Image (tube, rainbow, N blue to C red):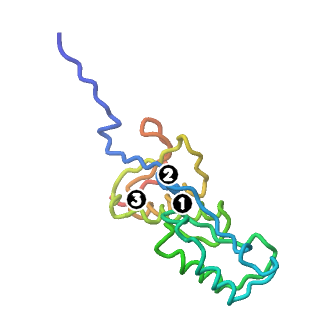
Amino acid sequence: MSEELIVNKVAESGLITLDLADYLPAKEIKSFDLKDFLFMGLILKEKDFRQALTTHDWSQYQDTPVAVFCSADAIVPNWAYMLVASYLDGVASFVYAGTKEETEKAAIIHNIHSIPSPEYEGKRLVIKGCGDKSIEAFAYLEITGHLKPVAKSIMYGEPCSTVPVYKSKKG
């Protein structure tokens, strides 16, 4: 009786699967609300603000993404955001001026753009379509735009069942 070999055609296809869940922020996003530093909840006084920042516990933001925003209806000068960013530099993993949701989106975009695209030069890519975590459409748009210039092809789904998205016209 001859031995039948089972051939895994997916494994031999040379497809590389990328899971966008790998580009979600690794840690929970922390908030830095400028409202807590306003005089009477309305005004940012420079001297008091600078003093409060020097005594603030910055270690709570160690290696985490931080959303910097003001939840009060107050006019906050742009330099205040810059000053907070200077304190978070070297502490937080990522800093963004916006809500937690906006910061998560910006962090995902940042992480996608940090993918070394030359690594995928001429490769056949599958962007995973299903998983335990919900991924918004913007992430699929970003990864396509980032890798399209170098990829041989980009598909959506699973290696055994894909939807073609892009195929290079280069030989």
Secondary structure under tag 1 reads helix
Three-letter code for the amino acid on which mark 1 is drawn: Ile
Q: Quadrant of the N terminus?
A: top left
Q: Which mark is residue 52?
A: none
- In space, the residues marked 1 and 3 are separated at their CA atoms by 29 Å
Q: Residue at x 65, y 60 (%)?
A: 101
- In space, the residues marked 1 and 2 are separated at their CA atoms by 9 Å
Q: Which mark is residue 169?
A: 3
Q: Residue furthest top?
A: 1
Q: Residue at x 57, y 56 (%)?
A: 28
Give left or right: position of 69 versus 169: right
Give left or right: position of 8 versus 165: left
Asked whether disc 1 touches disc 2, contact meaning CB atoms under 8 Å apart, the reply is yes
* Residue for badge 2: 20
Q: Is residue 59 above or below residue 19?
A: below
Q: Residue at x 59, y 60 (%)?
A: 29
Q: Is residue 134 above or below residue 138?
A: above
Secondary structure under tag 3 reads loop
* Residue for badge 1: 108
- The tag earlier along the polypeptide, 2 or 3, is 2
Three-letter code for the amino acid on which mark 3 is drawn: Lys
